């Protein structure tokens, strides 16, 4: 990709693209869900594609810190891995393979290659990868739309003066035209009077790329039935009579040479088979009647994990009836260590594992929100970079359960402020009042931390070297020293300078016996005798100490 002018492929453009693509899929999500009649009318294609690209966006932003000057190669690798790990459903898994192929081609681009050639080849490789990933390719689907886009890109890329913006303008237009023709290729689409849902998602993403590169918002091409016609009332009979009853998905750690045998074994069990990935990590999707056999095939090939099984009849019934009645209120909290997870669980929260380097995806938070069964959910992200992810998950959950689910995200930026918020949670209060009390408590809790510098850097407190002790207040580095305890008491004194009644100290994985935490608690008791102190074993990584003052 390039800027609207000319120049090399930059991380800045990639970051703008993923933001625009996620927003575009968010806007089109309900429309795409409504188009979903193939291969199973389960009404989730738009949501799955949206969550897949959201996971890729979250990964590339975490890897780069949102800095356009960061290493492009590392960011692209994170983007591809994020899409692979976050892929959901048949369409999401195929899309993750397409996105991976595109970023791998960008990463291999030579300094002398024209961007137009690189991007046209990337789209071709994305199309080829998508066809190769699917057990039995079917025309009139997102595969067809992706191939049309690739062919259009190749047809214009070789001409002199053509830039990446021209390639994406041509490919996006071809995708829209191919999308309009999908009902002519697939009988189930023609019968329902809709275009293909996955193809519509691909078109939305290509339109987003065109918008980023040209500044123009493309005008959709509408087929005979139109994009935006919702699917008719779902049939009331056995919707899975002509196909398998279950969708099985899992991540698989396996050697590349084990995958052909896995594909063959799963192909004998069912349909809608998609296996994508490489270099030891794979995402497997298949529709089967024998769930156990599908998982056993994965065990024979390697180590399956994050296994997801969906019963289509129940999923379709939920789409039709908005699922079973939801009752009560729950808190969903992201915990950065086993001790912290235990503290949140003891307070009644549903815990989602997180922390630096393993922040939860939008899909994981969405699953926790929905699976808890509550009519009202309060989400505590407990990390600055997880707040936006939580907000996306909350919006998606409310949209999927319109009128049946309320979700509030309290923007807790640290684990200790999350602990403060959950401590005042009261399910007996009105929802809005409970959220207000929790929000107020979290916002009034002053928070800090102590960590160890991993590299040479310039901080607000001056330069630091690897191994230096760093003191943090409200996310900013304010102390650089050589001794963890000295830095920790400096942070405590700063936090207590404005007064306080309770100090919470959370020991990390690097303080396994709690010696540092215990010394800090003794310091507070000696120098601030009117303040209460509590010490917990949090088990969080990278931060030997977390502290808050309320």
Image: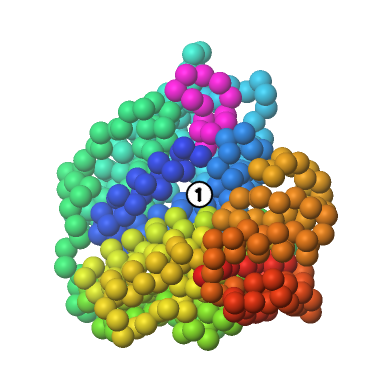
Q: Is residue 139 above or below residue 514?
A: above
| Rendered residue at 73%/54% (across/down) | 470
Q: Nearer the viewer, residue 395 or 501?
A: 501
Q: Nearer the viewer, residue 221 or 338?
A: 338
Q: Residue at x 73, y 72 (%)?
A: 523
Q: Going by the picture, which residue comes out furthest to the top?
A: 160
The magenta region covers 1-14
**Left or right relative to 459: residue 55:** left
- The correct choice, above or below, for 176 with respect to 251 in the image is above
Residue 413 point in image, percent of width and height:
51, 60
Residue plotted at (38% across, 38% down): 208
Question: Which percent across, then down, holds residue 109?
Answer: 64, 31
Residue 3 among those drawn in magenta: yes
Q: Dot 1: what SS?
A: helix
**What is the quadrant of residue 44 in the picture?**
bottom left
Residue depicted at x 77% and y 56%: 469
Image x and y of residue 22, in percent = 41, 48
Figure label count:
1
Work out whether residue 64 can be spotted. Answer: yes
Residue 379 image-quadrant placement: bottom left
Q: Answer yes or no: is residue 245 visible.
A: no
CA neighbours of label 1 inside 10 A, class few (<14), some (14 to 19), many (20+):
many
Q: On screen, 533 above or below 70?
A: below
Q: Is residue 461 left or right of residue 155?
A: right
Say whether residue 408 is magenta.
no
Q: Is residue 295 above or below residue 271?
A: below
The residue to which callout 1 is attached is 57
* Image x and y of residue 117, in percent: 55, 26
85, 342: nearer the viewer: 342
């Amino acid at each position: 990709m390039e800027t609207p002018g000319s120049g090399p492929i930059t991380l800045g453009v990639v970051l703008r693209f993923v933001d625009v693509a996620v927003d575009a899929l968010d806007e089109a999500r309900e429309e795409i869900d409504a188009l979903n009649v193939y291969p199973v009318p389960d009404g989730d294609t738009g949501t799955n594609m949206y969550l897949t690209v959201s996971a890729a966006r979250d990964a590339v932003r975490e890897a780069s810190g949102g800095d356009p000057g960061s290493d492009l190669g590392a960011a692209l690798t994170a983007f591809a891995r994020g899409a692979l790990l976050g892929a959901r459903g048949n369409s999401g898994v195929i899309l993750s393979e397409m996105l991976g192929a595109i970023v791998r081609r960008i990463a291999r681009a030579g300094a002398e290659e024209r961007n137009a050639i690189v991007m046209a080849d990337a789209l071709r490789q994305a199309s080829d990868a998508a066809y190769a990933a699917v057990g039995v390719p079917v025309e009139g689907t997102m595969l067809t739309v992706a191939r049309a886009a690739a062919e259009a890109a190749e047809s214009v890329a070789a001409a002199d003066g053509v830039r990446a913006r021209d390639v994406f303008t041509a490919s996006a237009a071809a995708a829209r035209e191919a999308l309009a023709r999908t009902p002519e290729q697939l009988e189930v689409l023609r019968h329902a009077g809709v275009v293909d849902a996955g193809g519509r998602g691909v078109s939305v993403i290509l339109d987003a790329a065109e918008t980023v590169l040209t500044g123009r918002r493309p005008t959709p091409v509408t087929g005979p039935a139109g994009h935006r016609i919702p699917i008719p009332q779902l049939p009331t009979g056995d919707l899975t009579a002509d196909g398998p009853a279950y969708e099985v998905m899992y991540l698989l750690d396996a050697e590349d040479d084990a995958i052909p045998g896995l594909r063959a074994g799963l192909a004998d069990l069912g349909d809608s088979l998609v296996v994508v990935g490489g270099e030891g990590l794979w995402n497997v999707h298949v529709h089967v009647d024998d769930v156990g056999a599908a998982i056993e095939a994965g065990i024979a090939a390697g180590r399956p994990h994050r296994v997801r099984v969906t019963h289509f009849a129940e999923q379709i019934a939920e789409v039709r009836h908005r699922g079973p009645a939801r009752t009560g209120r729950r808190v969903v909290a992201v915990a950065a260590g086993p001790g912290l997870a235990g503290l949140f669980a003891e307070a009644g929260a549903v815990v989602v594992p997180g922390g630096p380097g393993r922040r939860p995806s939008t899909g994981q938070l969405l699953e926790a929100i929905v699976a808890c069964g509550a009519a009202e959910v309060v989400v505590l992200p407990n990390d600055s970079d997880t707040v936006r992810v939580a907000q996306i998950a909350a919006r998606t959950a409310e949209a999927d359960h319109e009128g049946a689910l309320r979700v509030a995200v309290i923007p807790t930026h640290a684990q200790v402020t999350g602990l403060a918020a959950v401590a005042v949670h009261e399910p007996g209060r009105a929802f809005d009042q409970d959220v207000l009390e929790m929000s107020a408590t979290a916002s009034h809790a002053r928070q800090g931390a102590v960590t160890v510098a991993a590299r040479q850097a310039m901080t607000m407190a001056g330069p630091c070297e690897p191994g230096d002790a760093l003191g943090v207040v409200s996310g900013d580095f304010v102390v650089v020293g050589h001794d963890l305890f000295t830095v920790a008491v400096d942070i405590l004194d700063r936090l207590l300078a404005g007064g306080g009644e309770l100090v919470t100290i959370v020991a990390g994985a690097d303080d396994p016996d709690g010696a540092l935490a215990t010394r800090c608690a003794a310091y507070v008791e000696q120098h601030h005798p009117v303040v209460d102190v509590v010490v917990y074993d949090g088990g969080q990584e990278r931060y030997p100490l977390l502290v808050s003052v309320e």
